Image (spheres, coloured by chain):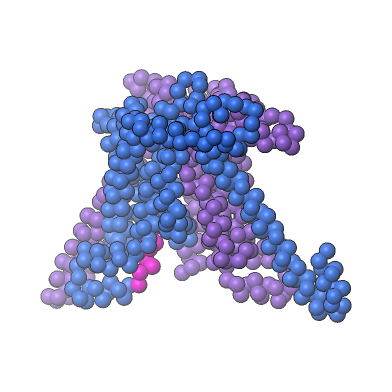
């Protein structure tokens, strides 16, 4: 439609082409914004609805007459009930403990290994690098049954220590893989200069590689953090007593009791449990995305 | 390499001796540095994978070797054939939808001015950031039959209420919807990164040659993104095949065990019903599929590396 007006305004052929191009661009922009708005509404609707439910009273949730996407008298009682619930706080501390330990372990293992694999070529290092990638492709749902037996054999079932033991299978391969990529992008001249100055391998790693590859390390740390925080299969399989449960499984299994669900509290619990990764994402979005895309673009 | 250096050493003189020591020290250090990684890979992945194969050949009490008996029993059962169908249907449908939606959104994001892209990207990635077990709780609540807020929205458009989790086919679709909602942003981010790496000159050249926007997509964008697309799709196939949390929270296999996928059924049989060998056998059904996918992923990556080199 706008092409015809452009053509009418500029009867000569050459202008017609230019006008239609501009109209095409504008049309593309309008389509883009419409798609993005619809997508954003769909993507954000579930968390928004969870939030709306979490600030409703049980009476309001049970009342079917009104609009479910609106809150008439907001309340924080669901949140306070959870925060003052020692069991829920226990879930939180278990998650914090497991996640911090796993992140520290993962980063130590993968930085050392990525440095050795990327810079100190040795017999089998190529094979091992491929092996790291293959392990990354093995999903946790393939391993949880044998690991259940192994962890049981070690007497670590129903204990957060068992989780600390097995979570590295989720985090270490990917973190090592992206750290190899980041270390590979550091120019060789830097380590030559360090060697000439008489640095040993450890000094080279701590003085040059870690500072230079810091963005990569942050990205890998964020990945390890979000994955261990969100882990679900292993804790569901290994943990049965509420005292040892981390957030994810604690909210899913313990806040659902009997036939009458406390929906408000359940949603509040889910949002509180999702909060740490979301906060990390909000503040470190660029690193988060760098870590996501590094796997494929560096690979 | 180590062999080569030791063989070459005797010919050289004194400084070479220290070089040899250095080489030995270097590979020892390298080995020590990789040792924790090797322990994780072999102790926690390779060994359990092998152990799973051994477990799958045992009888229920794990006292007797029964060969492929567990696999036979599984393939004979109607329920398990349904699980195979459901897993394949779920993974293939969900991955195709995620790839298409992700591609579309990445394009749309790429079109708008760079200044606004960050904000939109930040909003659209939110589903990927929330731990899926928890966001699925929200979906479960939206699907809940008597309070369903989705049906309330549909009612505005005079659509009759949908029995989201009550009927097998609707339950399957519900599971796929949640998975697509969760996974499409990941595709979007990957494709956006790929789109940004396509050199602008190629589009200019195509425009000068008079290419339409469809031709630009078909002959410039898609060939340039082919590798990322295939790697992302294959990777997502693995993750979707192995998905557990969404099915567990949303339907827990119901109604009548018709929405189980491999992972949730393995859990049901192996952990909840206590038949560990058969559970291991169920999860091993994922293995050949994953091996084939992994083969193609590795080939794609190697090709990509060769192209870049």
Q: Residue at x 75, y 71 (%)?
A: A21
- Given residues A129 and A79, the one toward you in this image is A79
Q: Which chain is blue?
A: A
State the image coordinates of residue B95 (x, y, percent, origin top left).
Answer: 58, 45
The quarter of the image holding the C terminus of chain A is bottom left
Would residue A45 be visible to someone looking at this image?
Answer: yes
Residue B117 lies in quadrant: bottom right
The quarter of the image holding the N terminus of chain A is bottom right
Work out whether B257 lies above or below B154.
above
State the image coordinates of residue B285 (x, y, percent, origin top left).
Answer: 49, 34
Spot the residue most to the left.
Answer: B14
State the image coordinates of residue A225 (x, y, percent, origin top left).
Answer: 37, 48
Q: Residue at x 47, y 47 (%)?
A: B129
Spot the residue most to the front.
Answer: A73
What is the magenta range?
A178-187
Q: Residue at x 20, y 76 (%)?
A: A197
Does B251 sit left or right of A159 as displayed?
right
């Amino acid at each position: 439609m706008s092409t015809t007006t452009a053509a009418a305004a500029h009867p000569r052929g050459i202008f017609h082409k230019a006008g239609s191009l501009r109209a095409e661009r504008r049309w593309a922009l309008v389509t883009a914004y419409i798609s993005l708005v619809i997508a954003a509404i769909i993507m954000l609707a579930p968390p928004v609805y969870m939030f709306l439910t979490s600030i409703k009273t049980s009476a309001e949730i049970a009342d079917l007459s009104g609009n479910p996407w609106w809150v008439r008298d907001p309340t924080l009682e669901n949140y306070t009930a959870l925060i003052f619930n020692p069991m829920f706080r226990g879930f939180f501390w278990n998650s914090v403990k497991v996640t911090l330990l796993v992140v520290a372990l993962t980063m130590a293992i993968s930085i050392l290994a990525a440095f050795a694999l990327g810079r100190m070529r040795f017999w089998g290092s190529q094979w091992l690098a491929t092996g790291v990638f293959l392990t990354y492709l093995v999903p946790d749902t393939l391993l949880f049954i044998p690991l259940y037996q192994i962890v049981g054999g070690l007497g670590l079932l129903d204990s957060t220590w068992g989780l600390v033991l097995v979570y590295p299978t989720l985090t270490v391969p990917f973190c090592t893989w992206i750290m190899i990529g980041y270390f590979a992008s550091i120019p060789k001249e830097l380590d030559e200069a360090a060697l000439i100055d008489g640095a040993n391998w450890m000094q080279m790693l701590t003085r040059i590689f870690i500072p230079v590859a810091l963005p990569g390390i942050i990205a890998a740390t964020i990945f390890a953090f979000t994955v261990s925080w969100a882990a679900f299969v292993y804790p569901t399989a290994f943990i049965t007593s509420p005292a040892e449960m981390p957030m994810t499984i604690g909210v899913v299994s313990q806040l659902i009791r009997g036939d009458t669900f406390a929906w408000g509290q359940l949603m509040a619990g889910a949002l509180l449990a999702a909060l740490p990764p979301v906060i990390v994402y909000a503040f470190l979005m660029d690193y988060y995305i760098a870590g996501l895309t590094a796997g494929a673009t560096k690979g | 390499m180590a062999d080569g250096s030791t063989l070459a050493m005797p010919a050289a003189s004194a400084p070479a001796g220290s070089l040899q020591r250095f080489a030995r020290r270097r590979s020892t250090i390298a080995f020590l540095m990789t040792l924790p990684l090797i322990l994780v890979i072999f102790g926690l992945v390779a060994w359990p994978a092998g152990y799973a194969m051994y477990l799958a050949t045992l009888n229920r009490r794990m006292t007797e070797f029964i060969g492929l008996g567990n696999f036979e029993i599984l393939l004979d059962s109607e329920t398990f054939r349904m699980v195979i169908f459901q897993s394949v249907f779920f993974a293939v449908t969900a991955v195709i939808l995620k790839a298409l939606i992700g591609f579309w959104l990445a394009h749309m994001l790429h079109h708008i001015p760079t200044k606004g892209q960050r904000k939109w990207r930040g909003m659209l990635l939110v589903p990927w950031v929330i731990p899926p077990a928890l966001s699925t709780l929200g979906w479960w609540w939206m699907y809940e039959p008597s309070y369903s807020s989705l049906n309330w929205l549909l009612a505005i458009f005079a659509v009759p209420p949908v029995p989201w989790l009550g009927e097998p086919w609707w339950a399957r679709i519900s599971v796929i919807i949640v998975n697509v909602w969760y996974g499409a942003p990941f595709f979007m981010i990957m494709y956006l990164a790929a789109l940004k790496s396509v050199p602008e000159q190629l589009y200019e050249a195509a425009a000068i040659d008079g290419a339409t926007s469809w031709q630009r997509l078909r002959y410039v964008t898609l060939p340039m993104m082919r590798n990322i697309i295939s790697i992302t799709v294959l990777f997502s196939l693995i993750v979707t095949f192995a998905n557990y949390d969404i099915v567990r929270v949303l339907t827990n296999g119901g109604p009548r065990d018709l929405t189980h996928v491999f992972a949730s059924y393995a859990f049901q049989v192996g952990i909840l019903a206590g038949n560990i060998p058969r559970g291991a056998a169920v999860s091993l059904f994922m293995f050949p599929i994953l091996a084939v996918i992994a083969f193609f992923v590795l080939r794609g990556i190697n090709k990509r590396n060769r192209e870049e080199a």
